[in-house]
Image (tube, rainbow, N blue to C red):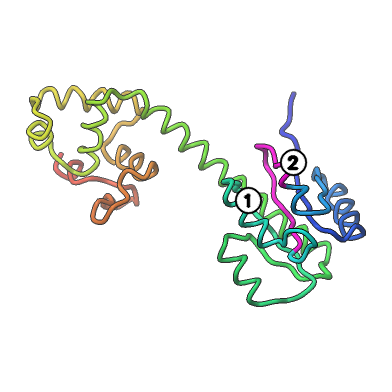
């Protein structure tokens, strides 16, 4: 029976002794490690698409930690970053956290503190990957809609009733109902509330005033649901 491989922790630090010690600690707790003595070394061997995080020193000889953070962001790398610094520089801490860092630790770092930060970062990456997978699945389902079905879908989730959609698209209400049925089958949903949730998750409702209302159970719903 196959099991998921252990998460990979990319450690980037130009202090060889620290790099070795952290690598040994992480390996002893079941993690795989990729040790890099410079920021450029990590950029030359980009992380693979697997559960992982980055432990990153702030001050290094070539590129600094914050500079590497910027470079990785530019390549759409979404691995959580835990910064480790020998200096408790508040401005640098604020800068890196605002740029999306998961945590900021100051040397000397206790083993338990380091492992806790890594565990949080890995859990965050797991959540990001799950969301990405769900969105990828939704986009795949959406791609199965015909252009007319897509148009009906987008009007439905904006709360337009069948009569309005028929007028806007120049078709009959019966045809609208037919397309609505097909849309719900292809997107594997049973209600307009679920259609609205899909639209929201895919960013199709991200404009002022278009967000779906909330039903009593917290699900997104549309004005059309409320009229049924």
Q: Secondary structure at mark 2?
A: loop
On the picture, is 223 further left or further right than 218? left
Q: Residue at x 26, y 52 (%)?
A: 213
Residue 47 falls inside the magenta stretch = yes
- Residue sticking out furthest to the right: 17
Q: Which residue is mark 1?
A: 72
Residue 6 or residue 23, whichever sits in front: 23
In the rendered view, tell whether residue 137 sits above or below residue 96.
above
Q: Residue at x 73, y 30 (%)?
A: 3
In the rendered view, tell whether residue 120 sits above or below residue 157.
below
Q: Quadrant of residue 201?
A: top left
The label number, if any, that marks residue 5 in the structure image: none
Real-space Cα distance between discs 1 and 2? Answer: 12 Å
Which of disc 2 and disc 1 is earlier in sequence? 2
In the rendered view, tell whether residue 111 sits above or below residue 211.
below
**Quadrant occupied by the N terminus:** top right
Q: Secondary structure at mark 1?
A: helix
Residue 212 or residue 206, whichever sits in front: 206
Q: Which residue is mark 2?
A: 45
Magenta range: 43-57
Image location (x, y in percent) of residue 202: 38, 41
Mark 1 touching mark 2, by CB under 8 A? Answer: no
Image location (x, y in percent) of residue 62: 77, 59
Image location (x, y in percent) of residue 70: 61, 57
What is the crowding at mark 1: few (fewer than 14 residues within 10 Å), some, or many (at least 20)?
A: some
């Amino acid at each position: 029976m196959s099991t998921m491989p252990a998460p990979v922790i990319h450690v980037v630090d130009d202090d060889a002794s620290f790099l070795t010690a952290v690598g040994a600690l992480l390996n002893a707790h079941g993690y795989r490690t990729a040790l890099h003595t410079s920021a450029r070394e990590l950029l030359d061997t980009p992380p693979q698409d697997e559960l992982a995080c980055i432990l990153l020193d702030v001050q290094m000889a070539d590129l600094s930690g914050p500079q590497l953070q910027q470079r990785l962001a530019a390549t759409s790398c979404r691995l959580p970053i835990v910064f480790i610094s020998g200096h408790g520089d508040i401005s640098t801490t604020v800068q890196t956290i605002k740029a999306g860092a998961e945590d900021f630790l100051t040397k000397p770092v206790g083993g338990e503190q380091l492992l806790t930060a890594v565990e949080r970062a890995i859990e965050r990456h797991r959540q990001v990957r799950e969301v990405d997978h769900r969105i990828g699945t939704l986009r795949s389902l959406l791609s199965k809609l015909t252009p007319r079905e897509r148009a009906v879908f987008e009007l439905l989730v904006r709360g337009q009733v069948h009569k309005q959609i028929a007028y806007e698209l120049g078709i009959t209400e019966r045809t609208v109902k037919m397309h609505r049925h097909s849309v719900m089958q292809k997107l594997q949903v049973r209600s307009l509330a679920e259609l609205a949730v899909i639209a929201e998750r895919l960013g199709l409702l991200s404009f002022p005033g278009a967000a779906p209302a909330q039903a009593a159970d917290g699900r997104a719903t549309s004005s059309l649901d409320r009229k049924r």
